[in-house]
Amino acid sequence: MDSQRDGGADDPIRSPHPDGDAVGFGPDADERTTGVDTIDIPVAQPRADVAHYRRPLLGIPWIAGLLLVPLLLAALGIATRSLGTAGAGTPGATASASNNPTAAPAGTGPVLEIITDSKSVILGGWVKDSTSQKTAAAALRSAYGQTIQVIDKLKTDAGALSIDSAGFAELANGIKGLSGVILNAQGGSVTLSGLATTDAAKNAALDGIKKAFPDAAVTSTGVVVGDPDTAPASCEATPAYVAAVTARTRIQFATGGTTLTAASTTALTKIADAVKKCPNLKVQVAGNSDNVGNAASNKTLSQQRATAVQDKLVALGVPAAGITAVGNGEEHPIASNDTVDGRTLNRRVDITVS
């Protein structure tokens, strides 16, 4: 919902009477036809010695006040809409950053991200200048060759990271040995997740990152070592197998909905085939969203996504009693919400087997 947030128009100035009519008066209010003889009643004439009461004319202050009321109401409406819009984007970001997805994120500095799947490598976020942009794209294209398309979505920002040619080449060659890579470099920290088939492949990726960003703190707890193409030989090996499957193919949805992608359905089928052979295993399904929209709505949407995956696993033969489904909302992103591709990755469901 992975959820999406808007203001309203000025209130109209209303008549003091809801029906819009003057109270107690009509076109024929001074005459009534009764069907009986009419009686002439003398009408008293005004006394010449009694002064007539005249309503005082409205003074300048009253007139000025009446003119200012619509202006004040309009200003109040505009201010209300502005507040609603400013709070509708990334938490903690400025209004301009929220309304303009291409602007560099505020707060912790512009992010550099690398995302891979079986067909492409997405290079996104921000780097310091055009030289850094060309260096990063060239390093990835050299490492991955012609079989994988490198999609360069980088933008430049003076406050972003500068790219060293030799160091980034080491990084590109290191992460090439992983699949399902999500790398985020922001400020003085780098996070890496993905699937490595061996410990050596994982260590090569970490070494490359340290050479590209020697002063950064690197977090790699999201890197899973395993083989998603070989079914587990025992129930003890099933949790690691499930982790490998979801590390390579994350369980994802379209924006704002609970419809699984085709790749996600295939991954769930592999997971169900392994888990249903082990009735004592417990499956936890955790739904997640991006930060677009209202936080409470995103929480609800993430629960609906978790429930959708739970229902799918049950339909594929996994016992319902062994599955729990929870919604985390936008609380646990695995990628930056400052980019379109990062938000896509955050609209997901995590599956843990124990």
Image: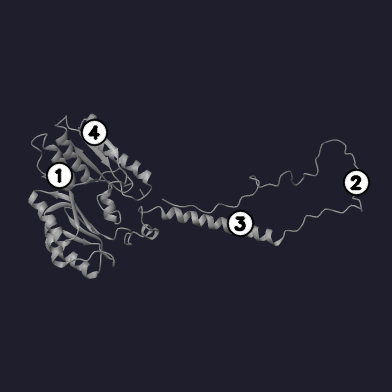
Question: What amino acid is at disc 4?
Answer: Ile
Q: How many marks?
A: 4
Q: Marks 1 and 3, Cα distance to the nearest angstrom?
A: 65 Å
Q: Marks 2 and 1, Cα distance to the nearest angstrom?
A: 102 Å
- Give the percent coordinates (x, y) of residue 286: 26, 40
Q: Marks 2 and 3, Cα distance to the nearest angstrom?
A: 43 Å
Q: Mark 3 and mark 4 in contact (Cβ < 8 Å)?
A: no
Secondary element under disc 1, as helix, strand or loop, is: helix
Q: Nearer the viewer, residue 21 or 191?
A: 191
Label whose residue precedes the other's in the sequence (1 or 4): 1
- Above or below residue 251? Residue 132 is below
Q: Marks 2 and 4, Cα distance to the nearest angstrom?
A: 92 Å
Label whose residue precedes the other's in the sequence (2 or 3): 2
Q: Is residue 348 visible?
A: yes
Which residue does the image show at 22% across and 66% down from the upper left? 162
Crowd band around label 3 with a 10 angstrom C-alpha radius: few (<14), some (14–19), many (20+): few
Q: Is residue 16 left or right of residue 100?
A: right
Label whose residue precedes the other's in the sequence (2 or 1): 2
> Which scheme is used to colour this image of the protein?
one colour
Q: Can you identify the residue that label 3 sits on?
A: 69
Q: Can you identify the residue that label 1 sits on?
A: 244
- Give the percent coordinates (x, y) of residue 327: 30, 40
Circle 2 or circle 1, nearest the eye: 1
Label whose residue precedes the other's in the sequence (4 or 3): 3
Secondary element under disc 4, as helix, strand or loop, is: strand
Q: Can you identify the residue that label 2 sits on?
A: 44
